[in-house]
Image (cartoon, grey):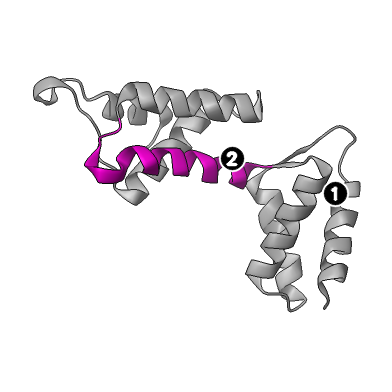
Amino acid sequence: MTIEKVRQDFQDRLDARPAGDRYLDRQWERSTLKEALAQGVTVDIARQALIELCQDQGFLLESTVLRDARHRLSVRAAGNREIDEREFNDVTTFIREKLGDRLQEGEIHRMLCEIIEDNQYPINRGVFGRDNWFARVKEVAGVV
């Protein structure tokens, strides 16, 4: 399958979406990429084609926003700088501004907690470890 055919298939899927809906969640992205993979396209080529098409046409991929959030957290955590509650809230605001009201705050917190835990980013727990804000956020977000 050629890259042009892949882009056309992606374009057809984008055209089939409701008018005005420019947001593509991870489930939609995953199913779209699976179709391309089933037709013999590598994941890297399919993903790059989808990203380029979305950028060209003003669609927003949830995974792109999460990648940017992950980058912000990794920059903070570089050199063992701990992520504090203010930084966590700043990244939450960044995601909310990008996605609007598409995700509830609890969902955003759940995603950020997973990113922090998956990457084992250091957490600032306050003076003498008394303010365990991260545990509090995880509990409210339902991350166990």
Give me the residue at 85% from left, 49% from top: 14
Q: Is residue 142 above or below residue 70?
A: above
Q: Is residue 81 above or below residue 49?
A: above
Give me the residue at 46% from left, 43% from top: 70
Q: Which quarter shows the C terminus?
A: top left
Span of residues in magenta: 61-83
Residue linked to disc 1: 14
**Residue 72 in the image, given as x and y percentages of width and height:** 44, 38
Of the residues under marks 2 and 1, which one precedes in the sequence?
1
**Residue 67 in the image, given as x and y percentages of width and height:** 53, 46
The type of residue carrying mark 1 is Leu
Predominant secondary structure, magenta span: helix
Quarter assignment of residue 97: top right
Q: Which quarter shows the N terminus?
A: bottom right
- Would you say 108 lies left or right of 44 here? left
Q: Is residue 13 above or below residue 108?
A: below
Give me the residue at 48% from left, 27% from top: 92
Residue linked to disc 2: 65
Give me the residue at 20% from left, 27% from top: 125
Q: Are marks 2 and 1 in contact (CB under 8 Å)?
A: no
- Would you say 94 lies left or right of 84 here? right
Q: Is residue 57 magenta?
A: no
Name the front one of labels 2 and 1. Answer: 2
Question: Could you classify mark 2 by the number of other residues whose Cα lies within 10 Å: few (under 14), some (14-19), or many (20 or more)?
Answer: some
Looking at the image, the residue that sits furthest to the left is 128
Q: Label 2's element? A: helix
Q: Is residue 140 visible?
A: no
Quarter assignment of residue 12: bottom right
Q: Label 1's element? A: helix
